[in-house]
Image: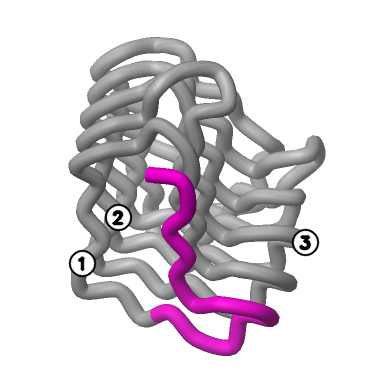
Amino acid sequence: MVTLAPGIHGSLTVTEPGLTIKGQPGAVIRATDWTAVKIVADNVTLDGLTIEGGNFGVFITNARGVVVQNCDISGASWAGVMIASDDGPAHANTIRNCKVHDNTHEGIYVKGNCRGNVIEHNDVYQNGDEGIQNTHC
């Protein structure tokens, strides 16, 4: 487990399977790259983080069993959360108990070879085009 202290942290790419990243109150990941958090490993958990900016706040690809929970995700120029098969299938991931808001296009966007994903108990609001979009799955 990695615990992020309060303060501003730059973009992350998670390649280590089974990693949990938990934010202490006031921990913010602010995009310094095209995505704030890119996850390309199985069974990763993001918990209790504020995630801001980037083209995507959270981008999950070629990963399964990812859990994003208790996060506040906003300010992405495309989607707050993107689950996509761009680099390989993205199955059985969960987005729960998050606030996903004020993103330019979608709040949560699921596309491509992505099966069994769960989106539950989220507040998805004030996104430019759709709150939740599911295409080509």
Query: In what element is the residue under mark 2?
Result: strand
* Label 1–label 2 contact, CB within 8 A: yes
Would you name the residue on which mark 1 appears? 120
Would you name the residue on which mark 2 appears? 95
Q: Residue furthest top?
A: 16
Q: Earlier in the sequence, mark 2 or mark 3?
A: 3
Q: Earlier in the sequence, mark 1 or mark 3?
A: 3
Give x and y (percent) for residue 120: 20, 67
Q: Residue at x 25, y 68 (%)?
A: 97
Query: In what element is the residue under mark 1?
Result: strand
Q: Give the spatial CA distance, label 1 vs label 2.
A: 6 Å
Amino acid at dot 3: Ser
Q: Give the spatial CA distance, label 2 vs label 3.
A: 19 Å
Amino acid at dot 2: Ile
* Label 1–label 3 contact, CB within 8 A: no
Give x and y (percent) for residue 111: 48, 45
Q: Residue at x 29, y 34 (%)?
A: 66
Q: Which residues are magenta?
A: 124-137
* Displayed quadrant of residue 38: top right
Q: Give the spatial CA distance, label 1 vs label 3.
A: 23 Å
Q: Residue at x 70, y 38 (%)?
A: 10
* Displayed quadrant of residue 67: top left
Dot 3 crowding, Cα within 10 Å, few <14, some 14–19, many 20+: some
Q: Residue at x 36, y 23 (%)?
A: 63
With respect to residue 125, does 46 lie above or below?
above
Determine which of the numbered discs, if any, sits on residue 77 in the image. Answer: 3
Give x and y (percent) for residue 51: 56, 56
Q: Nearer the viewer, residue 39 or 24?
A: 39
Give x and y (percent) for residue 121: 21, 74
Dot 1 crowding, Cα within 10 Å, few <14, some 14–19, many 20+: few
Q: Nearer the viewer, residue 23 or 39?
A: 39
With respect to residue 123, does 19 lie above or below?
above
